[in-house]
C-alpha cells in the first residue's frame, strides 16, 4: 500500500547488506520501517496476525502526515549549535518537534539528516526497545529517487542504529530517553547557517572571512592578497608602511584593518558583497523536506497539515479567510449568505467567497504537479 501512496523502499547505510540478489545495496535494511517490508520487526496481533511496524518519519512527512509546526529545521534561525527537545513520532508530548531536520549540503536542499524517536508500542510493539533514529535523506542515482538511509553502527554484529554522529560538519549527541515525558534532549552542532547558497563561496580574504561571493570574486581576492606587497609605497607615506601606491586604496573587506591595496572598484565590490552577505548565506532557510514546492509556490497552510502549494497571494488570502472565518459562519457549520464552505481539506468549515472556493478546487487538483518530491 505504501507504494500506492508514492513511497519507496527504505535503506540503511550498510554497504555490506544486500537482502536479495536483485535488491540494491542497503535496500530493505531499515527494520523499524514498514517500507523495508522484506526485513522488519513484526508483532503478533489477535485479529490480523503478524503486523509490520509503522512508517519512519520521512515516510510520514512524505505523505503530509506530520504537522508543519512539529518539524524543526536546524540552522533556519541562524543557530550553529543548540540543545533541542525531541518527542516521540507517535503519541507525542505537546509543544516539542516530532522530527529534527539538519541540512548540510548546500548543493542539494533535499540532502539532510532526520532525527526521530519511536517507542516500543502499538504498531511498533515488535521493537526490541525504545529507539532514537538518525536517517540520511539522499538521492539514489540508481533509481533516480530520494530515499531514507538509516545510519547503523558498522563495527558490531548487532548493527544497531546510531544515536550520535560526527560527519559532514554535523555533530549530533542524544541524551537519555525520558519515558515518562516521552522526550529526549538532542545536542546539535552544524555550520550550515554559515555556508553559502548555491553559486557562492566564502571570500576568505582571511581564513575567517565567510562573506559569500562568486568564485570569480574569491579568485580576485586571493590574487589581490598575493600582490599586496607590490602595491605598497616603498617610501611610506601618511599611513606608514601600509600606504598604497598611487591608484590603489585599502580594500577594507572584512574590517577597517584590511589594508591590502586594491583598485577602487575592487573596494567598492567588497563593500557591495558585504551588504549582500545575509542574502547569500544559510541554505537551511530553503530546506523544506519531501513536499517542497516548486519555484513560485508556497504551502497554503490552511491548517498545520496543509502542504498544498499555492501562490503567495493565495496563501495570504487563506490566512485572511481563517482570521474572519467565525464571522461568516452560522451554527451547524453553515455559512452566511454569499459564502461557501471552503473544504480545502476534510472538515474544513471556513466560509469563503465563491472565487476563493473555485481557487481551492483548482489548487487541490494541481497539488501533485507543484511538489518537488525530495
Image (cartoon, helix red, strand yellow):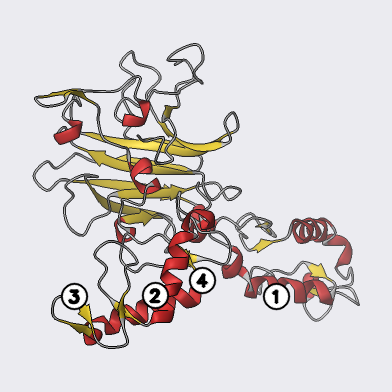
> Nearer the N terminus, badge 4 or badge 1?
1
Vertical comparison of 42 with 221: above or below = above
Mark 2 or 4, closer to the camera: 2
Mark 2: few/some/many CA within 10 Å (<14, 14-19, 20+): some
Residue 96: x and y, percent?
23, 56
Question: Is residue 166 toward the left or the right of residue 41 in the image?
Answer: right
Residue at label 4?
A: 311
Residue 104: x and y, percent?
51, 47
| Inter-mark Cα distance, 4 to 1 | 31 Å
Question: Is residue 121 toward the left or the right of residue 69 in the image?
Answer: left
Image point 50% across, 60% down: which residue?
A: 366
Residue at label 3?
A: 333
Q: Secondary structure at mark 4?
A: loop
Quarter residue 295 falls in: bottom right
The disc label shown at residue 357, or none: 2
Vertical comparison of 90 with 326: above or below = above
Mark 4 or 1, closer to the camera: 4
> Nearer the N terminus, badge 2 or badge 1?
1
Task: Tell me, yes or no, whether the two marked residues, 2 and 4, touch with CB atoms within 8 Å.
Answer: no
Quarter residue 319 falls in: bottom left
Task: Tell me, yes or no, whether the two marked residues, 1 and 3, touch with CB atoms within 8 Å.
Answer: no
| Inter-mark Cα distance, 2 to 1 | 46 Å
User: Where's the N terminus, which quadrant?
Assistant: top left
Q: Secondary structure at mark 3?
A: loop
> Nearer the N terminus, badge 2 or badge 4?
4
Mark 4: few/some/many CA within 10 Å (<14, 14-19, 20+): some
> Nearer the N terminus, badge 4 or badge 3?
4
Task: Tell me, yes or no, whether the two marked residues, 2 and 1, touch with CB atoms within 8 Å.
Answer: no
The disc label shown at residue 39, or none: none
Image point 30% across, 37% down: which residue?
A: 55
Residue 306: x and y, percent?
36, 62
Residue at label 1?
A: 272
Amino acid at each position: 500500500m505504501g507504494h500506492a501512496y508514492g513511497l519507496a523502499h527504505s535503506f540503511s547505510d550498510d554497504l555490506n547488506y544486500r537482502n536479495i540478489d536483485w535488491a540494491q545495496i542497503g535496500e530493505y535494511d531499515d527494520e523499524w520501517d514498514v517500507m523495508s517490508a522484506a526485513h522488519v520487526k513484526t508483532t503478533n496481533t489477535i485479529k490480523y496476525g503478524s503486523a509490520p511496524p509503522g512508517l519512519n518519519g520521512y515516510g510520514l512527512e512524505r505523505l503530509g502526515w506530520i504537522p508543519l509546526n512539529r518539524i524543526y529545521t536546524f540552522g533556519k534561525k541562524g543557530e550553529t549549535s543548540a540543545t533541542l527537545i525531541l518527542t516521540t513520532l507517535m503519541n507525542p508530548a505537546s509543544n516539542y518537534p516530532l522530527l529534527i531536520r539538519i541540512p548540510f549540503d548546500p548543493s542539494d536542499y533535499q540532502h539532510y539528516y532526520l532525527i526521530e524517536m519511536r517507542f516500543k508500542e502499538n504498531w511498533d510493539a515488535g521493537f526490541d526497545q525504545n529507539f532514537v533514529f538518525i536517517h540520511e535523506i539522499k538521492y539514489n542515482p540508481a533509481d533516480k529517487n530520494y530515499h531514507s538511509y538509516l545510519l547503523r553502527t558498522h563495527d558490531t554484529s548487532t548493527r544497531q542504529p546510531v544515536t550520535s554522529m560526527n560527519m559532514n560538519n554535523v555533530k549530533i549527541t542524544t541524551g537519555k530517553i525520558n519515558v515518562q515525558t516521552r522526550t529526549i534532549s538532542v545536542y546539535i552542532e552544524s555550520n550550515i547557517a554559515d555556508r553559502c547558497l548555491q553559486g557562492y563561496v566564502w571570500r576568505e580574504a582571511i581564513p575567517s572571512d565567510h562573506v559569500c561571493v562568486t568564485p570569480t570574486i574569491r579568485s580576485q581576492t586571493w590574487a589581490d592578497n598575493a600582490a599586496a606587497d607590490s602595491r605598497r609605497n616603498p617610501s611610506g607615506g601618511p599611513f606608514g608602511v601600509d600606504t598604497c601606491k598611487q591608484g590603489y586604496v585599502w580594500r577594507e573587506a572584512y574590517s577597517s584593518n584590511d589594508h591590502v591595496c586594491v583598485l577602487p572598484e575592487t573596494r567598492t565590490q567588497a563593500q557591495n558583497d558585504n551588504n549582500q552577505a545575509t542574502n547569500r548565506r544559510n541554505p537551511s532557510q530553503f530546506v523544506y523536506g519531501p513536499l517542497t514546492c516548486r519555484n513560485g509556490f508556497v504551502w497554503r497552510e490552511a491548517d498545520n497539515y496543509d502542504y498544498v502549494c499555492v501562490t503567495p497571494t493565495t496563501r495570504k488570502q487563506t490566512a485572511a479567510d481563517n482570521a474572519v472565518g467565525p464571522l461568516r459562519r452560522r451554527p451547524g457549520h453553515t455559512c452566511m449568505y454569499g459564502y461557501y464552505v471552503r473544504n480545502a481539506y476534510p472538515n474544513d468549515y471556513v466560509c469563503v467567497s465563491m472565487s476563493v472556493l473555485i481557487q481551492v478546487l483548482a489548487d487541490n487538483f494541481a497539488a501533485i504537479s507543484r511538489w518537488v518530491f525530495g
